[in-house]
Image (tube, rainbow, N blue to C red):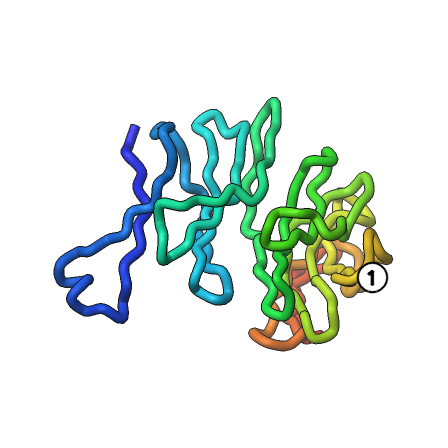
């Protein structure tokens, strides 16, 4: 198996790039691992990475300080007797010291809000249905937009849920029955809706 390393280099320091002065992050004693995802926190003083065991039964979300790459904080851990599915749903919120996290710990993939110390603030979605993916976070209005299978496993719709309420009401944003894929504008809750079903050829609308 390949050897995995994760390092930080300052783009502001041209000499560091020239001299290859890399600050290597301590990934622990276990070398047969995956580094599944890497994301900056909003202040760029901390880096997050998702550490996964080779058998994919353990997933850690870890933080590391740019100023001290040897000091690692394990913020939360997901475990499964089978395997832990990966996703791209981690979102660090800008207006609060918290982050959005998707987990299948209940048996279904749902959304949770944690503070930066790894304490759960609230569960946002619940039920015998699954979230597909986070599509947009509107912090100004306090909503998370996500695709999921709440109404039928045979359909995919866009929904939104409040960031402020524990397992609040889920509002469906797409109307027609079928499969919906969405693309949001960069900074506003406006989206392209790509939609089709067994009787409807693919069509696109702006909503």
The residue closer to the viewer here, 47 or 150, is 47
Q: Secondary structure at mark 1?
A: strand
Q: Position of residue 164 (x, y in %)?
A: 78, 62
Q: Residue furthest top?
A: 81
User: Quadrant of residue 27 in the image?
Assistant: top left
Q: Quadrant of the C terminus?
A: bottom right
The residue closer to the viewer here, 32 or 74, is 74
Residue under the point 30% across and 42% down: 5
Residue under the point 35% across and 45% down: 70
Would residue 17 be found to the left or right of residue 117 on screen? Answer: left
Q: Position of residue 90 (x, y in %)?
A: 57, 53
Residue beneath label 1, please?
Answer: 171
Q: Residue furthest left?
A: 19
User: Quadrant of residue 100 in the image?
Assistant: bottom right
In the rendered picture of this protein, how many numbered marks are placed on residues?
Answer: 1
Query: Dot 1, how many residues are within 10 Å of its Cα: few (below 14), some (14-19), or many (20+)?
Result: few
Residue 198 visible in the current orientation: no
Seen in the picture, residue 29 relative to 172 is either above or below; the reply is above
Q: Residue furthest right?
A: 169
Residue under the point 75% across and 54% down: 178
Residue under the point 59% across and 74% down: 185
């Amino acid at each position: 198996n390949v050897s995995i390393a994760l390092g930080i280099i300052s783009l502001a320091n041209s000499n560091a790039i020239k001299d290859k002065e890399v600050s290597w992050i301590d990934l622990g004693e276990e070398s047969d691992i995956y580094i599944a995802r890497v994301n900056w926190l909003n202040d760029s003083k901390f880096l997050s990475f998702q550490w996964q065991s080779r058998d994919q039964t353990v997933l850690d979300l870890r933080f590391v300080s740019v100023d001290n790459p040897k000091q690692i904080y394990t913020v939360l851990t997901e475990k499964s007797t089978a395997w832990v599915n990966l996703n791209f749903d981690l979102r660090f919120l800008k207006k609060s010291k918290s982050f959005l996290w998707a987990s299948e710990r209940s048996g279904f993939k749902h959304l949770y809000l944690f503070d930066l110390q790894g304490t759960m603030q609230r569960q946002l979605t619940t039920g015998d249905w699954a979230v597909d993916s986070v599509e947009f976070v509107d912090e100004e209005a306090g909503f998370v937009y996500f695709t999921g299978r709440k109404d039928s496993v045979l359909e995919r719709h866009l929904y939104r849920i409040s960031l402020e309420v524990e397992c609040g009401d889920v509002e469906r944003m797409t109307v027609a029955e079928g499969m919906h894929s969405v693309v949001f504008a960069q900074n506003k809750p406006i989206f392209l809706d790509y939609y089709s079903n067994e009787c409807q050829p693919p069509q696109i609308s702006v909503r």
